[in-house]
Amino acid sequence: MAYPIDQKLVVGITSTALFDFAHEHQIYVEEGVEAFRLFQKENRKKLPAPGAAFPFIKRLLNLNRIFAEEAPVEVVILSRNDPEAGLRMMDALPEYGLDISRAFWLSGADPYPYMKAVKACLYLSTNKNEVKAAVEEGHPAGYVLPCVTSNDDLDNQLRIAFDFDGVLVDDEAESQFVDGDLPLFHHHETTNKDRPLKGGPLMPLLQKISNIQDIEKRRLDRANDPQKAVRVSIITARNAPAHERMMNTLKHEGIEIDELFLMGGIEKKNILDVLKPQIFFDDQLGHLEPAAENTPCVHIPFGIRNQEKLQE
């Protein structure tokens, strides 16, 4: 009987997103693939430091311990490394208590096309160009920014924060605001408040997370536990009256969130520094770069905000 991968929340991740291989990557860039392979071989017993996405993956996998019967999460390594270079990373997984047993080592080939093979609803990489190409082909992929500091020792709860437009939903509403026309944006959203927005790149991920939250709600031993296993927040530049269409869209998708921050132009870093999520997804680098000082951040290069003409 085949492994039921389609029933899981599957995340594909590269080696440099999970572990800090910045020095090794520099060797690859400056000295070539053979020098890189030799370094990995000679340093196989040296434990790599955690990368920017490590806190998210660690707590995501912990859900399989909390909900052992369902084991709802699967993490698959999708890497450009060759199989021999990948041995160092595979050795590190049990040392960190990461229950990851599935890995694809592709010797320089693009990893993201294999997302379909494992039914992944998210692909995390530190390669900007690779992520851009993946998103253009319709894959839910994100560029993991370097994170300066991230204290992940406070508790065991998984906290995930999302922007809304261009991340969870498409950029229909965003296109009304991109030129700075706030009155037009509010008019458009108020007029269409009862028409749900179409799903964006990470809506399937949020739906899978919502399914895990439903498992917790059905568990009698956790029903009244104030320390939820997963806590989901939306941090959006929207404010009233544009909030109603957002809430109607989430209701249409059957999704309940734990926190909603209607920022209305306030710096998102202010909230993230208090909330301390293990990961934050946004389609605008302008929101992510300041926040990445303390919060693991992922750029989703989707929609009108990321068109070439807006990057010039």
Image (cartoon, grey):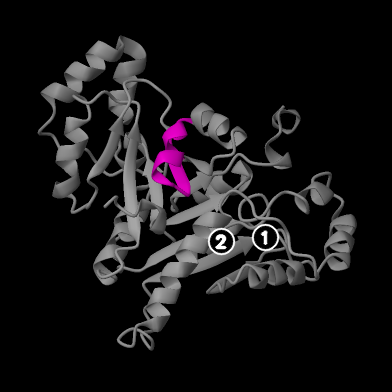
Q: Are marks 2 and 1 in contact (CB under 8 Å)?
A: yes
Q: Position of residue 121 (x, y in %)?
A: 47, 49
Residue 210 vs 84, above or below: the answer is below
Q: Residues within 10 Å of mark 2 (few under 14, many from 20)?
A: few
Q: Nearer the viewer, residue 62 or 154?
A: 62
In the image, taking residue 287 as reference, residue 311 lies left or right, namely right
Kindly identify the amino acid type of the residue bearing the numbered disc 2: Asn
Element class at badge 2: helix
Q: Position of residue 21 (x, y in %)?
A: 30, 32
In the image, taking residue 216 as reference, residue 166 lies left or right, namely right
Per the image, the residue denoted by label 1 is: 266
Q: Nearer the viewer, residue 16 or 254?
A: 254
Residue at coordinates 53% horizontally, 44% vertically from top-left? 140
Is residue 290 rendered magenta in the image?
A: no
Q: Is residue 151 visible?
A: no
Residue 44 vs 157, above or below: the answer is above
Residue 68 vs 236, above or below: the answer is below
Residue at coordinates 77% horizontally, 51% vertically from top-left? 172
Q: Nearer the viewer, residue 184 or 216?
A: 216
**What is the number of the mark on residue 270?**
2
Per the rendered image, the range of residues in magenta is 112-127
Q: Position of residue 243 (x, y in %)?
A: 74, 69
Q: Is residue 114 visible?
A: yes
Q: Position of residue 296 (x, y in %)?
A: 43, 50
Residue 8 vs 224, above or below: the answer is above
